[in-house]
Image: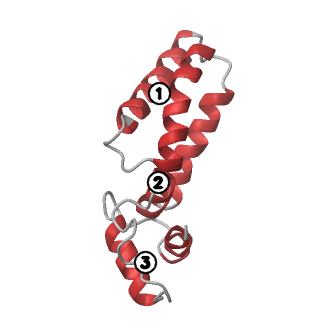
Amino acid sequence: LTVAQKSILENPIGWSLNRYDQAFNYFIKKNPQKKNLNLYNNKDGTNNFVKIIVEFGFFGFLFYIFLFLFLKSKKIPIELKLFYLPFIITQSIRGIGYFNGGFALIVLLMIFSYINHRNKLK
């Protein structure tokens, strides 16, 4: 979380896709820790939420705003919400990357479902 906080303040656009480890190393060198934390979660940030915020900056928040709008939308059937959101929530809390655990697949399915249901009900 410290890396995400420092990253959003210093580089609000983000570090780019799969560059969390570079941001981690940059901030650890800049602000050395009393404990040796260089070996822990330096590749994945321990969860996808932190990784998204570091790599995409404020644009990462747009993803979570989309999740909120998806959840709030009355056009999306509750069955789809109950299917997609547990994957996203668990991967955001403790996922290890975008391409593990089906995170990217579920995000794409959510986007296509949102577009499909939005266009059907117009």
Q: Amino acid at mark 3?
A: Leu
Q: Is residue 9 left or right of residue 102?
A: right
Q: Secondary structure at mark 1?
A: helix
Q: Secondary structure at mark 2?
A: loop
Q: Answer with mark 1 or mark 3, whichever residue precedes in sequence.
A: 3
Residue 40 screen position, x and y as percent = 39, 69
Give 23 or 44, whichever is nearer the viewer: 44
Q: Residues within 10 Å of mark 3 (few under 14, many from 20)?
A: few
**Residue at x 36%, y 68% (from the top left corner):** 42
Rendered view: 55 above or below 95 = below
Give 112 or 2, whichever is nearer the viewer: 2
**Residue at x 68%, y 19% (from the top left corner):** 74
Q: Answer with mark 1 or mark 2, whichever residue precedes in sequence.
A: 2
Q: Secondary structure at mark 3?
A: loop
Disc number at residue 37?
Answer: 3
Disc number at residue 110?
Answer: 1
Q: Residues within 10 Å of mark 2 (few under 14, many from 20)?
A: some
**Residue at x 54%, y 31% (from the top left corner):** 86
Q: Is residue 51 left or right of residue 64?
A: left
Disc number at residue 47?
Answer: 2
Task: Give the number of the mark in front: 1 or 2.
Answer: 2
Disc number at residue 7?
Answer: none
Task: Give the number of the mark in front: 3 or 2.
Answer: 3
Residue 115 screen position, x and y as percent = 48, 23
- Cα gap from disc 3 to disc 2, whole angstroms: 16 Å
Residue 111 screen position, x and y as percent = 45, 29
Q: Answer with mark 3 or mark 2, whichever residue precedes in sequence.
A: 3
Q: Amino acid at mark 1?
A: Met
- Cα gap from disc 1 to disc 3, whole angstroms: 36 Å
Q: Amino acid at mark 2?
A: Asn
